[in-house]
Amino acid sequence: MPKMKTHSSLKGRFKITGTGKVKRYKAYKNHLLSGKSGRQKRVLGTNPVMAPGDVRRLKQQLANIK
C-alpha cells in the first residue's frame, strides 16, 4: 500500500502543541484592518485550541507534521 501523504495546505494553517493539541488561526485578520477596532484585532490575534470534534478529522492529515 502507498503511504498516506500529509495534506500540504494544512502545514501553514495549524500547529500541534507539545501535548498534542491543535492550534488554529482565526479568520478576518488578513486585510481591511484599518476599519476594524483595536479590540477586534487584538482578539483575532490569539490562536485558540481547536474543538475535540474537529481535531479527530485533522489528526490523520496532520500525522506527519511535528
Image: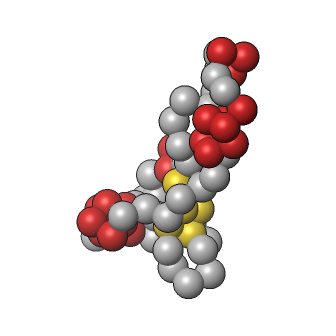
Front-most of residues 9 and 22: 22
Q: Could you say which quadrant of the image residue 57 lies in?
A: bottom left
- Above or below, 56 relative to 9: below
Q: Could you say which quadrant of the image residue 19 lies in?
A: bottom right
Residue at x 27% of width, y 66% of height: 53
> Can residue 3 be seen?
no
Quadrant containing the C terminus is bottom right
Quadrant containing the N terminus is bottom left
Front-most of residues 4 and 1: 4
Residue 5 screen position, x and y as percent: 43, 59
Q: Could you say which quadrant of the image residue 34 lies in?
A: top right
Color theme of the render: secondary structure
Front-most of residues 56 and 41: 41
Residue at x 53% of width, y 59% of height: 48
Number of numbered callouts drawn: 0
Residue at x 50% of width, y 50% of height: 10
- Above or below, 47 relative to 40: below
Residue 4 screen position, x and y as percent: 37, 64
Residue 62 screen position, x and y as percent: 46, 64
Residue at far bottom of view: 19
Residue at x 60% of width, y 55% of height: 47
Residue 25 screen position, x and y as percent: 56, 48
4 displayed left or right of 39: left
> Can residue 7 be seen?
yes
- Above or below, 65 relative to 40: below
